[in-house]
Image (cartoon, grey):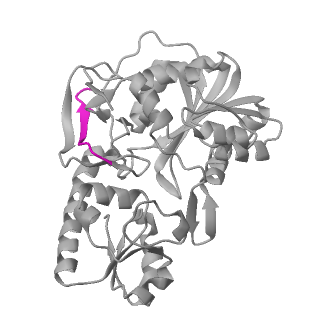
Amino acid sequence: MSDQPMHQCDLCGHPEAESLIRLGTGRAMRSDRVVVAADLDKSRCCCCGLVRSTTLPDDTTLRSYYGDEYTVAASDYVFWTADGPLLRSEIFCSWLSEAMGVFRWEKAKRCLEVGAGAGALMEQFVRRFPHLTVEGVELGPEAKVARERGFTVRQSPVEEEPEGQFDIVYCIAVLEHVRSPSAFLAELRKRLRPGGLLYLSQPTQDVPSYDLFFVDHLYHFGTDHLRAYARKCGFRELGFVVGHRLMPNFSLHLWQAEDLADDFAWHGPPGRTDCAAAAQRISNDLHRLDETLADLQRRGRVVATFGLNEVFGLARAYSNLGTYPLCCGLSDDPAAGPAGLSFPVLRPEACSDHGVEDVLLTVNAIYYPQLIRRLTPLGVAVHPVLT
């Protein structure tokens, strides 16, 4: 992507920022788990504390990138829990509709999803609220898949949607990808009817996470920053929730459209986030992983990795795992593993057939207790990657 320096903060307008993290490895991970040739470079506003990419692509480049290059899975993501598999779309539908009052959805008539993908979440809302007209926009080719499934999804930016027509607009994991959250939120507000509702959910920096290490996440918000964006962009905050039990690093925010404020300014100290601590913590984790890999290779151990999604991509991009001779990958759904791997993907119970002695846990740390209980009886040594 063609990047341009960011000369002032999108939220508060302050012209100065300090470097937060710069990894000049020439490798970086996108949120679709693709490792690309790039450096990771993030900065923090000296006034409000909002963390952003030090350089930003222009809007034309971003639209082309998400339309042609960015990979969105056509199938729904599955959370493997102790109670069985749960679909990501089911989780988000329940969270959005129940967290701050199901009556809001029961009263609504027309709804717009921004970043609708292949329509998995739309399908859940249509099932739960059959009276509700649910439409969507999606920049990528997944819009065609959604239309083939019978959903109204236009492959176009939200700016081309009619103004003042929707009771509810919602977007999941979109705000962190746009060049200017201020401009994007203003466009969402225009699509709402007077008093309409906006539901936003995206990674939150109120809690520990590795979101900072996604090179295509251009912004990293704390609750203080989102509350300020609401004031700046013509919304009143009705409520928010930090963390879901299966997605502790996501927050959910409900805003209502109201008159634009003409006197917005940032007041007080910088907004609190975990970004600086995450930069240090995960850099330490990756250094420790390199030491573990060197020790395992020196001892000639047979090593597998459990988990082939985000944490695996993180480790491949920013540690020596990308070139390590792994025996195999372990997954509860081997067929869903990423393409192009140099090793087979097996169910965990099959690892003893391949002589596996050590397993790296390349998954979210919330799954560690569950996985350690499951893998230890198989006679393997378990190595968590994240602290």
Is residue 71 positioned above or below 162 on the image? below
- Residue found 42% across the figure and 22% down from its top: 60
Give the residues in magenta: 36-48
Q: On the image, which quarter does residue 47 sit in? A: top left
Percent of width and height locating residue 183: 45, 19
- Residue found 78% across the figure and 47% down from its top: 127
- Residue found 40% across the figure and 34% down from its top: 224
Residue 37 is one of the magenta-drawn residues: yes
Percent of width and height locating residue 90: 66, 53
Which residue is nearer to you in this view: 21 or 105? 21
Residue 130 left/right relative to 35: right
Q: On the image, which quarter does residue 238 sit in? A: top right
Residue 239 left/right relative to 300: right
Q: On the image, which quarter does residue 109 sit in? A: top right
Percent of width and height locating residue 70: 45, 41
Is residue 107 positioned above or below 372 on the image? above
Is residue 387 positioned above or below 241 on the image? below
Quarter holding the C terminus? Answer: bottom left
Residue 339 left/right relative to 342: right
Percent of width and height locating residue 267: 33, 22
Quarter holding the N terminus? Answer: top left
Residue 179 in view of the camera: no
Q: Report the number of numbered marks.
A: 0
Residue 289 left/right relative to 235: left
- Residue found 39% across the figure and 90% down from its top: 379
Residue 308 is one of the magenta-drawn residues: no
